[in-house]
Image: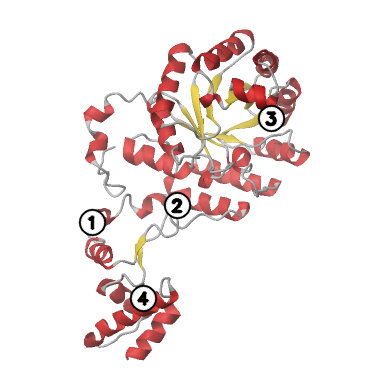
Amino acid sequence: MSHDEKGKWWVSPSNYDEEVRRDFKFADRIEILDTTLRDGEQQAGIVLNMKDKIKIARKLDEIGVHRIEAGTPATSEEDAQAIKEIAALGLKAKIFCFCRAMPKDMELAKSLGVDGVICEIIGSEEMLKFGKRWTPEQAAAACIEATRVAHDLGLYVTLFPADGSRARLEYLVDFADKVSSEGHIDALALVDTFGTFSPEGAALRVRKLRERFSFPIEAHFHNDYDLGTASTLAALKEGSPVAHVAVNGIGERAGSVSLEPLVVSLEALYGVQTGLKLNKILELSALVAELSNFPVPPTKPVVGSHLFGWSTGLPSSLWSNAKEENPLIMLPFHYDLIGATEPVLYLDKKSGKDNLKYWLKKTGLSVPEEKERELLELVKAKSLEVKRLVGEAEFRELVAKVA
């Protein structure tokens, strides 16, 4: 892959400069773990029933997501049944569920047919003390017992120390060391529960944990400072082989790391193949938006509905000139890459002659050439009056007025 992958994207050549890339430690295979059905549903106001979860799981598998975190079985009987149904679908993706550090949760997980568990425990001393009212010794003992049971049951065990990003590194290392030596850990999730990592902080912590442990360090970050994607990329560059994401970035507070910009960034900006079918991303996003009743903002990166289009005169003219011969002149990546449609031109007070020509062609209307300037001024005035884009019905009225 390169910075100007033909027909796919055209990004800065600096991204692919050897001076930039020589320190990358990307894993040979990066896996995407999607937690839409668990962490995503924890967004206040989102409720997914069993049918919803099965539909989303099928779509996640269709686009090639490697792991699906199907929910928390202890939440309700229906959640447990949904996990069981998803595990029985025969999907290519590995199916995980989220469990408390309790043997009965591990036994329940095994009965549902999942491949692995994500074993949660509070991961910072402060949250243990003031939130859970537990001692570190209690937390370690619970994890040791639960992870032993899970391992004995043949489950893959990812230890999930919530708020581990804010813990002292020494505490986190000692805790993981104790659980791994007396219990069992197949992978350790580095968990930034409150989105407090800077990319540099995330990279350092992954690097330190990888120096200490031989098991994989997974990246589970949130987006409270709008740096979740950047910090996850920083973790992956340091060798973290698994990124935890959610479709449309849904999740508690400011949300989880969004699947869509993360995987497109990996491919286009870093040249790392994910194996996902990027041209299905919009379909997946739309499905989750519909079933979650949580709409996607129109300018959301990668999947927003207003990303591929312009209302301002100059970029509209540049697009009109370039679109047939070299559309990537005006795009960060080709719209076909994610299954989007060709960019459109809008009408508002900033529009120019090419916007007008686009709309005359679109509506099949015409005005004398000497009247085009008058029509454009009417469009601008109408946009100012209504303080938004001019719609098709309004445009037709303005054309009739001029004609």
Residue where numbered disc 2 is placed: 300
What's the residue at 38%, 35% (across, down)?
273
Of helix, strand and loop, which one carries label 2?
Answer: loop
Horizontal side, residue 128 vs residue 383: left or right = right
Q: Quadrant of the N terminus?
A: top left
**Residue that badge 4 annotates:** 362
Please provide percent x and percent y for residue 346: 36, 69
In percent of the image, x 48 and y 13: which residue is there?
214
Q: Amino acid at mark 4?
A: Lys
Residue 43, compared with residue 210, is above or below; it is below
Quadrant position of residue 58: top right
Element at label 3: loop
Q: Is residue 282 above or below residue 196?
A: below
| First reached walking from the N terminus: tag 1 or tag 2 | 2
Amino acid bearing label 3: Gly
Mark earlier in primary sequence (3, 2): 3
Badge 1: how crowded within 10 Å, few (<14), some, or many (20+)? Answer: few
Real-space Cα separation, disc 3 to disc 1, in angstroms: 50 Å
Give the Cα separation between the discs numbered 1 and 4: 22 Å
Please state which amino acid type lies under the numbered disc 1.
Asn
Q: CA distance from mark 1 to mark 2?
A: 25 Å
- Mark drawn on residue 113: 3
Q: Tag 1 or tag 3, which sits nearer the N-term?
A: 3
Dot 3 or dot 4: first in sequence order is 3
Q: Is 148 situated left or right of 302 in this image?
A: right
* Residue 24 vs residue 280, the one in the foreground: 24
Which residue is most to the top? 181
Kindly report which numbered mark, 2 or 4, lies closer to the viewer in this rendering.
2
Mark 3 or mark 1, which is nearer to you? 1
Residue that numbered label 1 is attached to: 326
From where the camera sits, is residue 157 visible?
Answer: no
Where residue 127 appears, x then y in whole percent?
Answer: 62, 25
